Amino acid sequence: MQRRRAVPIAGWAVGWIYQHGESVLSVSGAVPLPHIAIVGAYAFGNTSWNGNLAPGATATFSLMGTAPGFPAPEPHRLLPALTGRP
């Protein structure tokens, strides 16, 4: 993700809902956040070292997951919603 506004933020979060049985197995560069009890819902936030983003700065996290069946779900099914705290 990249911070495009002119104001720095002190913390970020991303969340999404998988709708076809996909699941997250592990994550790096982010921590799990509590979220509402919706099947397939995931939420992650910054770690202590990547939460403060200056204008134009980026933060990266990665995850490993699984999906049922073949072929794998199309990439556009992951629809994150980014939030930040100025």
Image: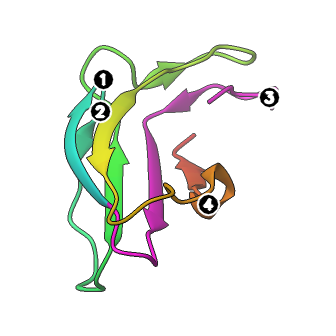
Quadrant assignment for the N terminus: top right
Q: Position of residue 57 (x, y in %)?
A: 65, 13
Give the residue at mark 2.
30
Q: Residue at x 30, y 23 (%)?
A: 29
User: Which sits in the foreground, 20 or 45?
Assistant: 20
Check if mark 1's residue and mark 2's residue have beta carbons within 8 Å: yes
Q: Between marks 1 and 2, how big is the CA–CA gap?
A: 4 Å
Marks 2 & 3, CB-CB < 8 Å contact? no
Q: Specify start and end residues of the magenta stretch as a single range.
A: 1-22
Please tell me whether residue 56 is drawn above or below residue 32 in the rendered image.
above
Helix, strand or loop for disc 2? loop
Mark sitting on residue 79: 4
Which secondary structure, mark 1?
loop
Q: Disc 4 residue type?
A: Leu
Q: Position of residue 25 (x, y in %)?
A: 18, 46
- Label whose residue precedes the other's in the sequence (1 or 3): 3
Q: Amino acid at mark 2?
A: Ala
How far apart are labels 4 and 1 at the CA level?
Answer: 19 Å
Q: Nearer the viewer, residue 23 or 51?
A: 23
Q: Crowding at label 1, few (<14), some or many (≥20) Cα neighbours within 10 Å?
A: some
The residue depicted at 73 percent of the width and 18 percent of the height is: 55
Residue found 30% across the figure and 14% down from its top? 49
Q: What amino acid type should be assigned to the residue bearing mark 3?
A: Arg
Crowding around mark 3 (Cα neighbors within 10 Å: few <14, some 14 to 19, many 20+) is: few
Q: Which mark is residue 4?
A: 3
